[in-house]
Image (tube, rainbow, N blue to C red):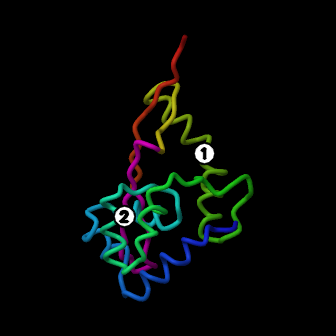
Amino acid sequence: MELPEIVSHLFAAKKAKGLSFADLEKILNRDEVWIAAVFYRQATMSEDEAKLLATALDLDPIYIDLLTDYPIKGLGPVVPTDPFVYRFYEIMQVYGLPLKSVIQEKFGDGIMSAIDFTMDVEKEVDPKGDRVKLTMSGKFLPYKKW
């Protein structure tokens, strides 16, 4: 998967400033996962948000326009090769249909929105090995009949 050039520039500026996504969350008043999505060009910033980020990272003003452009979203039509990303793909391969069945039993025929959506990442300390806890919340969208 080839990433747009802006991605490497954003990460380099973040590293040069010594900031984490949690630090940027405090500056932008947006969730750290959403900000990371912006860095990978999977989300679009408002002009005010882009100005705040540009100031925080000492970016050239041209980045304000780039960060407010509508990106092409998604990984493309290929199986991800990055091991971390692949595991989520694998989770959906194994549990996607079971999740679909359980959700549709509870809500009816429809889908969970990835547009009206939030995600939170937490670290759970465990003596057997720390755990990643993800909480996803998406609006249920029933299929429409016409």
- Residue 101, given in percent of the width and then of the height, sits at 56, 34
Query: How many C-alpha atoms fall within 10 Å of the one at disc 1: few (<14), some, or many (≥20)?
Result: few
The secondary structure making up most of the magenta span is strand
**Residue range highlighted in magenta:** 115-134
Q: Residue at x 60, y 53 (%)?
A: 72
Query: How many C-alpha atoms fall within 10 Å of the one at disc 2: few (<14), some, or many (≥20)?
Result: many
User: Which residue is label 1 attached to?
Assistant: 96
Above or below, comparing residue 58 to residue 135 in the picture: below
Above or below, comparing residue 23 to residue 104 in the picture: below
Q: Which image quadrant for residue 4?
A: bottom right
Q: Nearer the viewer, residue 28 or 89?
A: 28
Q: Is 109 left or right of 49, judged from the image as shown?
A: right
Q: Which part of the image, by quadrant, shows the C terminus? A: top right
Q: Hey, what amino acid is under mark 2?
A: Ala
- Residue 64, given in percent of the width and then of the height, sits at 41, 65
Q: Residue at x 47, y 39 (%)?
A: 113
Q: Is 112 left or right of 81, judged from the image as shown?
A: left
Q: Nearer the viewer, residue 125 or 116?
A: 116
Above or below, comparing residue 85 to residue 115 in the picture: below
Disc 2 on helix, strand or loop? Answer: helix
User: Which residue is label 2 attached to?
Assistant: 50
Q: Are marks 2 and 1 in contact (CB under 8 Å)?
A: no
Q: Nearer the viewer, residue 48 or 17?
A: 48
Assess whether residue 85 is covered by the magenta stretch.
Answer: no
**Distance CA(mark 2)–CA(mark 1):** 35 Å
Q: Residue at x 55, y 71 (%)?
A: 6
Q: Hey, what amino acid is under mark 1?
A: Gly
Mark sitting earlier along the chain (2/1): 2
Assess whether residue 124 is covered by the magenta stretch.
Answer: yes
Q: Which part of the image, by quadrant, shows the N terminus? A: bottom right
- Residue 40, given in percent of the width and then of the height, sits at 53, 65
